Amino acid sequence: MPAMMKAAIFAEKGRIVLDDKPIPDVGPNDALMRVTTTTICGTDIHILKGEYPVAKGLTVGHEPVGIIEKLGSAVTGFREGQRVIAGAITPSGWSHACLCGYCSQDGAGTKHGWKPIGGWKFGNTIDGCQAEYVLVPDAMANLAPIADGLTDEEVLMCPDIMSTGFAGAENGGIKIGDTVAVFAQGPIGLCATAGARLMGASRIIAVDRIPERLAMAQKMGADEVVNIGASNDPAGAIMDLTDGRGVDVAIEALGLQATFEAALRVIRPGGTLSSLGVYSDDLKIPLDAFDAGLGEKTIRTALCPGGKERMRRMLNVVRSGRVDLKGLVTHRYTLDQIEDAYDLFGNQRDGVLKVAITT
């Protein structure tokens, strides 16, 4: 009988449960990671609600911090017992998308077009990391060592939300002196705010309806805040703050029509809307906000960049002290309490931002 482990699995719409599964076998190019800390993402809640389809029985989760338990026979450059992270996106490194520089889209085209987000495998197309162990595919392309002195919680944001939020700032093409608006200050929006500051934005306007999140946004680098609860017209408030000029870059980090539309309305002519949200319904682009297609505006989308080089860069930023994301961990659970953690995070109670799940 194979050795068993505990894992959080998708049972059916509305139910993720802790159950036993076999510890994965290790192929030549793989690594088996013993997960020490992981977390729950908003995308996991989309899975829980049935808004994003995955196979029943799949282990969920895509943000692992841990220790190499076993290396495949072809894996070099790492050692068993080494502390590592792997990105939420685990590209192969050799697909057409990877070779074009878009590792997150790793996958294959079909006669019907390109299959997007193929690089997101953990908790999507293969078993994820809300478990005692996770199998990391193409380990040499995806493992990144953790420097001595960094704790699990200090690097917990690197695999996904830090990389995603920073991608929102990068895709916006932020330049020194830019004015940037970041719509929604959940974990990814907060990382986008921090990323915008790192890239040289001189004025960052954070938008949310929760006062505690707006306060956290100011700690991450926001200069001004717009509380949607106090203003039903965040776009108008931002236009007033900028004396009618608008912003150079707007980052949408929620995935709703209302925030997407507001972000489109506040960018100046020639500005950029950098979209990070995961959308569950069709989007509509209002004719006036789009300037009938004549406003020279850019809309860019992003999926979390992954791979070991991206993870190395995220770890370097944390190690340098230029950002401190430990404050995003507001609650702590063990893997045995994962169902309680989902109940808290899915219902956004008790001021939760991120939960640390330890095994």
Image (spheres, helix red, strand yellow):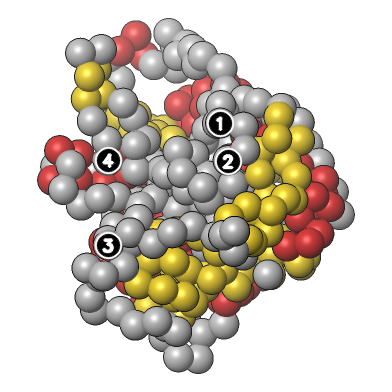
Q: Which residue is mark 3?
A: 28
Q: Are marks 2 and 1 in contact (CB under 8 Å)?
A: yes
The quarter of the picture where residue 303 lies is: top left
Residue 164 x, y percent position in the rendering? 44, 51
Q: Which residue is mark 1?
A: 55
Amino acid at the residue labelled 4? Asp
Q: Secondary structure at mark 1?
A: loop
Quadrant of residue 111 within the rendered picture: top left
Q: Earlier in the sequence, mark 3 or mark 1?
A: 3
Rendered-image quadrant of the N terminus: bottom right
Q: Badge 3, how many Cα within 10 Å: few under 14, some, many 20+?
A: few
Which quadrant holds the C terminus? bottom right
Amino acid type of the residue that numbered disc 2 sits on in the rendered structure:
Leu
Q: Earlier in the sequence, mark 4 or mark 2?
A: 2
Residue in view at x 34 percent, y 37 percent: 118
In the image, is residue 46 above or below residue 178? above
The reply to whether residue 90 is visible in this rendering is yes
Q: To which residue does mark 2 refer?
A: 58
Give the residue displayed 14% in from the left and 42% down from the top: 100
The image shows residue 357 at horizontal and vertical percentages of: 69, 64
Residue at 76% across, 55% down: 338
Q: Of circles 4 and 3, which is in front?
A: 3
Dot 4 corresponds to which residue? 106
Say if residue 211 shows up in the picture: no
